[in-house]
Every structure is written in structure tokens, then in C-alpha cells.
């Protein structure tokens, strides 16, 4: 959950939420928020991006639910995770905010992987 928030979410003591273009990732996030924190995330917005021909889903919760998520996810430091947990963090970060370019045969470019984070602190934690 910490990786999902770091790459595709927003979290403060007042409001926590998640934005995704992938229905499966969004469904996983909502189910995991319910299982892990007992929080029901509500669909706030579903917008169609005509250029990319994808939907963008925004889920959110407020108040005590947001505060409970904030305390448990923002304090997560990926550098302190054990190997199995670190791999799970990496997978979740890629699902939520990652992309990978695989070169075509004969191309002069190499493989490229990229992660998008909501803020510098999350990105620096990921690098550690």
C-alpha cells in the first residue's frame, strides 16, 4: 500500500486517495484498503482521456479513515524492508506508477524503466 500511495496516490491526515488508469490496479487498491485498513474508498471521479483512450479513476476517503492510512503508509521506509517486502514494494510501485520501454530488434536504444512519484520524499525513499 505504501508503494501504491507513493506512485499513484495522495495521503495526508485529512484525505487519502489514489488515481489509476488501470481498472485492475484500481480494484486491487480499493480491496486492499478495505482489507488492510478497514477503509472503504469511494469513487470520486472517472474521466475518459480522449487522447490516450483510457479512463482515469480517482478514489478517496477523508477524516479518521484518511488519518489511519496516513499513519501506516507514510512512515513506511522502503530501505528498511526485508527482501521479500522490498520486491513487493517494487512490483506495486511499477503497477501503479511505472512504465517500461522495450527496444525493437536492431534499435540503438536500450531498455528504459521509469517510475512516477507524487513527491520528492517518496522518490528518495524509493531510491534508498
Image (cartoon, rainbow, N blue to C red):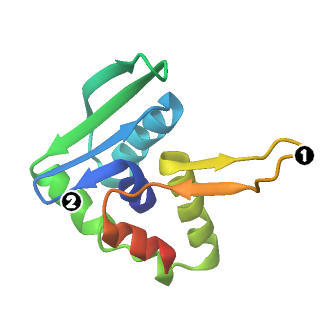
Give residue 99's position: percent from left, percent from top: 59, 47
Q: Using the image, tell me which numbered label, if any, was put on residue 68.
A: 2
Residue positioned 48% across, 49% down in the render: 97
Of circles 1 and 2, the one toward us is 1
Quarter of the N terminus within the rendering? bottom left
Q: Nearer the viewer, residue 126 or 106?
A: 106
Q: What is the quadrant of residue 2 in the picture?
A: bottom left
Q: Is residue 121 left or right of residue 21?
A: left
Q: Which residue is mark 1?
A: 106
- Secondary element under disc 1, as helix, strand or loop, is loop
- Secondary element under disc 2, as helix, strand or loop, is helix
Q: Residues within 10 Å of mark 2 (few under 14, many from 20)?
A: some
Q: How many marks?
A: 2
Relative height, residue 50 to residue 62 (above, below): above
Q: Using the image, tell me which numbered label, if any, was put on residue 28.
A: none
Residue positioned 39% across, 58% down in the render: 117
Give residue 66's position: percent from left, percent from top: 18, 52
Amino acid at each position: 500500500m505504501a508503494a501504491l500511495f507513493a506512485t499513484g496516490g495522495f495521503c495526508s491526515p485529512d484525505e487519502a486517495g489514489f488515481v489509476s488508469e488501470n481498472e485492475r490496479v484500481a480494484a486491487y487498491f480499493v480491496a486492499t484498503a478495505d482489507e488492510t485498513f478497514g477503509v472503504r474508498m469511494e469513487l470520486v471521479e472517472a474521466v475518459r482521456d480522449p487522447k490516450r483512450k483510457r479512463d482515469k479513476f480517482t478514489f478517496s476517503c477523508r477524516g479518521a479513515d484518511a488519518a489511519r492510512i496516513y499513519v501506516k503508509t507514510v512512515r513506511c521506509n522502503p530501505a528498511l524492508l526485508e527482501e521479500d517486502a522490498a520486491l513487493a514494494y517494487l512490483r506495486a510501485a511499477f503497477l501503479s506508477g511505472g512504465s517500461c520501454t522495450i527496444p525493437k530488434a536492431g534499435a540503438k536504444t536500450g531498455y528504459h524503466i521509469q517510475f512516477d512519484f507524487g513527491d520528492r520524499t517518496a522518490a528518495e525513499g524509493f531510491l534508498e
